[in-house]
Image (cartoon, coloured by chain):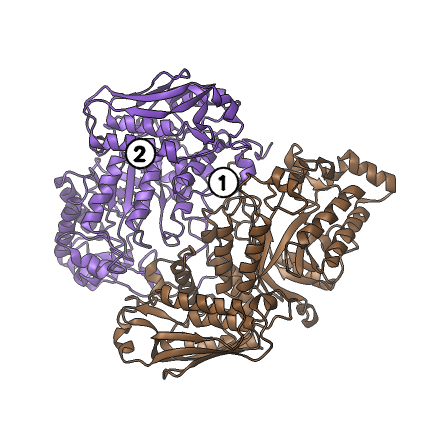
Chain colours: A brown, B purple
Amino acid sequence: MTATLQRLSFILFSASYVAAIWPLPASLSSGSSALILSTDFDVILPDNAPRDLADAVGRTKQFLSSDALGRLVPDRGASDKDAIGSAPALGSLVLTVTGDLKSIAEVATAELGSRDEAYTLTVPDDGSDATLSANSSLGLLRGLSTFEQLWYTNEAGIYTVEAPFDIEDGPVYPYRGFMLDTARNYFPVDDIKRTLDAMSWVKMTTFHWHVVDSQSFPLQIPGFLELSEAGAYTAEMVYTPENVADIVAYANARGIDVMVEWDTPGHTSVISKSHPEHVACPEASPWASYAAEPPSGQLRIASAETTNFTTSVVTALSGMFNSKYLSLGGDEINAKCYTDDAETQASLNGTGKDFATALSEFTNATHNTLRASGKTPVVWQEMVLDYNVTTVEKDALILVWISSEDAISVVEQGYKIIHAASDYFYLDCGLGGWVGDNVEGNSWCDPFKTWQKSYSFDPVANMTSEQAELVLGGQHLIWTEQTSPANLDSSVWPRAASSAEVFWSGPGGNVTSALPRLHDLAYRFNQRGVAAIALQPIWCALRPYACDLTA
Amino acid sequence: MTATLQRLSFILFSASYVAAIWPLPASLSSGSSALILSTDFDVILPDNAPRDLADAVGRTKQFLSSDALGRLVPDRGASDKDAIGSAPALGSLVLTVTGDLKSIAEVATAELGSRDEAYTLTVPDDGSDATLSANSSLGLLRGLSTFEQLWYTNEAGIYTVEAPFDIEDGPVYPYRGFMLDTARNYFPVDDIKRTLDAMSWVKMTTFHWHVVDSQSFPLQIPGFLELSEAGAYTAEMVYTPENVADIVAYANARGIDVMVEWDTPGHTSVISKSHPEHVACPEASPWASYAAEPPSGQLRIASAETTNFTTSVVTALSGMFNSKYLSLGGDEINAKCYTDDAETQASLNGTGKDFATALSEFTNATHNTLRASGKTPVVWQEMVLDYNVTTVEKDALILVWISSEDAISVVEQGYKIIHAASDYFYLDCGLGGWVGDNVEGNSWCDPFKTWQKSYSFDPVANMTSEQAELVLGGQHLIWTEQTSPANLDSSVWPRAASSAEVFWSGPGGNVTSALPRLHDLAYRFNQRGVAAIALQPIWCALRPYACDLTA
């Protein structure tokens, strides 16, 4: 198993140095030679390189010169000056691709499981050309991200003291994601782009964009502009179709697929502002009887008109995104909301259907509409575990969120899963309750999920090998009741990097040996303008293992 | 009691509007009239106004024009346009001072209890002059901070819809502080200045600067530059004497006294890098046997040379700060560090003294040196509760930190206290352990301290009225093992504003009615460049009480 080999190779080297690559490559060997980047260092593109690969190389060259990261040792690398003074200079990194030279975007948006991300990177210690080869431009992008992490800067130049490098790498799981909720609090496009940059640096593949919810509807959907006109917090707090196209292109060029979510039929209160006819129990009181959080409101699943409206929006929404995946939600449907809704009860009584049948038919309609747009449905776990819905097909991806222990029940039914469990991956837990008039309130998912916790996650716990094949990967998530642009970066980074490594490198990593690498990553993020938090005092960050519990 | 009156006046008004003043004034009445700021609005200074008061007025005028804060209602105040279109315009705020016109800095650095911060502010609703009067320039500064919080901005101008205002105000406690640790992680001067700005907006009086610790010594002390040369993380991560003078002047001009701390005799490992002769158990292993956190190291309290060195540094340090208060620490002294230190044991054996006697003498020497420099010693609670030290005089201020329940034991001994208890005021709790090799580690002071928790603090719990007189106030604190410039603002604000109100307005505030005001404060902080976090979804922030647990 690749993951085991990789751990072994890392442990062999970890005593003597920190190869600060994150996520850890499947196979890595390195040395102890100094090597500097030539002042005229260049990256040689393959012939007919697609534009987004050329752009990626441009970013790599920019980072090499602008990262200006001092090595995480007490003197920040100042004393490396002597060692590198006489070191060979690396003049070129030569890229070669062995497969069809499609764009990064094309590969990154292909079906999960069909995206070739593997690469081979060699950096000799004698100054002869470094080489990066892959079967796809996406593989080259992953290799470039690794190459960028090899270098430090001091007064004498840009250098490593760990040459030569030989790396064979590729991911264990294809889905490595991050979910951002832009409905509870709004995030400007630049915040999203900065997040996409950071995601790409740790080789993530999917931006799960929980774009709207009961609180606000910032997304402008062509043909349904009334939703955002009535539902965005302000006229400025919107994502226009141009913004969406820009975000999708930005993500794709960085190897990231944008999986948008329209959470239905719950979490749709805000739709009542433009379409009161489609929403049961809008802003009902007390909210706690009608929804998990205020305001309440759910699409009238038993109404033919509401079903038609919903499928029309799904079609329009699908047209805005090029991903093969789109989430239609399905979590936290409140029964009382429908029980107390006269229109829903009349519809059910008129047809003799029960709630499960109505929800099954609604789901069948929206999912089939999605498939007609060429997309695969994604749903939260309740849709296959809780509501007796009969119409979730096996092509769907199931997001396991309530507890990691629920994953087994989903794969037992033969569904594909994405790990997104609150007990490992919710970045918003443990910071106290946000509901008002509740002085001793805690977050529902206490305690705070540390990077160590998510790093210790086992994606295939208790599964047979057949069930394990159904695991596509996983992600960190942030629900933004208490998160705004003020604390987006610091809430997410570097914690979310821990799942990026679990699902790239495979489980079984050791938090003790990972910490120095994660420090390095967090420091590099800061050099690049992403405000990752400090995991320890600087004293500890500069002295691997000195602040271990047992040191 | 002022605090009771104030709560009553607030409750009477809270049903109909949000007077978003933070901290809540002792007495406040307001109306429902619209009033705009004239385009040539000006603030009229008293004759012979000191420079720092004129500067404060300049900042107020700048904030009035640059805050550009929309009211926290669903339309952000757009529909106020009609109401304010025909509203009277306020042309002037006239400042008058009835006492000696000393500078803000002079009043802000006077002895605690002698700083007059009271002010009276009236804003008529007919456009006639607003007036702000006080006995001191510091009182005027406090009133200006309040005045700034009355105004919102929409397309039609800068306005309020709650005129007239009549405010009589002054603090319940004189010490309202915030502690920043700049030793675990370093913070550039600009971060400190931005923090001082924010502190002044909520009328805090003391910046408790935990400037050095075992991990690093960023402070350049004239005559002892070797301490920072050997002990700063990098040559750039220092506070020069010029930086200190700049910070102190900046703070004082904003009504804030800078109480620096040199934590002794523990928490001094870093001194061993330049003065190994003065430090017992430097960087000993395992660290957990010798210190609360790595690296270990304590001043040799039984050594006459070390005592002399320490008092010399105290004198030099005192000369850098104009505050009448300076903390010499005294927490977490590790007994084994001295037991295992041959030099300390030889000193004790040679003189026949025990640990408590040696520590008492050391303390007496350093405290008397401090007094000779015109300063009052401040110490952590162990110095009067745990070590049998006989030489802490009753002039000292005692920082209660381990538990709020320890306050009573300190006042029972007749000492003055500053509330700084971890169970209410530590901003770094609840985010997981930072020590390495510790996958399930929690922070020692779990759980996370919400603003609601600190807001519910009672400074005089279980005290007699005589004991209550010994309470000078309190503060939030942040220890920066996991805090860096990346998350300083978001870790501190708006949470620390809750203690600012408790100690200005008095205890007994109601979290439910406070929340809309705290939202307003956090939004205004963001407009001013301080990244306070969102406490709730925007939907809730714009709808007071709609997200209460019982709504």
Mark drawn on residue B535: 1
User: Residue tagged by mark 2?
Assistant: B59
Identify the image quadrant of the N terminus of chain A.
bottom right
Q: Nearer the viewer, mark 1 or mark 2?
A: 2
Decide: is A435 above or below B509. below
Q: Nearer the viewer, residue A466 or B37?
A: B37
Q: Amino acid at mark 2?
A: Arg
Q: CA distance from mark 1 to mark 2?
A: 27 Å
- Residue B486 % position (x, y): 39, 52
Hey, what amino acid is under mark 1? Leu
Whether residue A135 can be seen here? yes
Q: Residues within 10 Å of mark 1 (few under 14, many from 20)?
A: many
Mark 2 Cα-neighbour bin, 10 Å: few <14, some 14–19, many ≥20: some
> What is the quadrant of residue B193 in the picture?
top left
Q: In what element is the residue under mark 1?
A: loop
Q: Callout 1: residue from which chain?
A: B
Residue appearing at x 68%, y 58% in the figure: A398
| Chain assignment, label 2 | B
Secondary element at tag 2: helix
Looking at the image, which residue is at 39% across and 54% down? B482
Give the x, y percent position of residue A130.
43, 80
For the image, the number of numbered tags is 2
Up the image or down, B19 lies above or below B490; here it is above
Which percent across, then down, holds residue A323?
A: 64, 60
Quarter where residue B528 is shown: top left
Please say if B283 is above or below B410: below
The vertical placement of A188 against B343, above or below, is above
Of the pair B4 and B321, the residue shown nearer to us: B321
Please name whichever residue, A335 or B55, is drawn nearer the observer in this view of the structure.
B55
- Is A411 left, or right, of B215 in this rendering? right
Q: Is residue A189 left or right of residue B305?
A: right
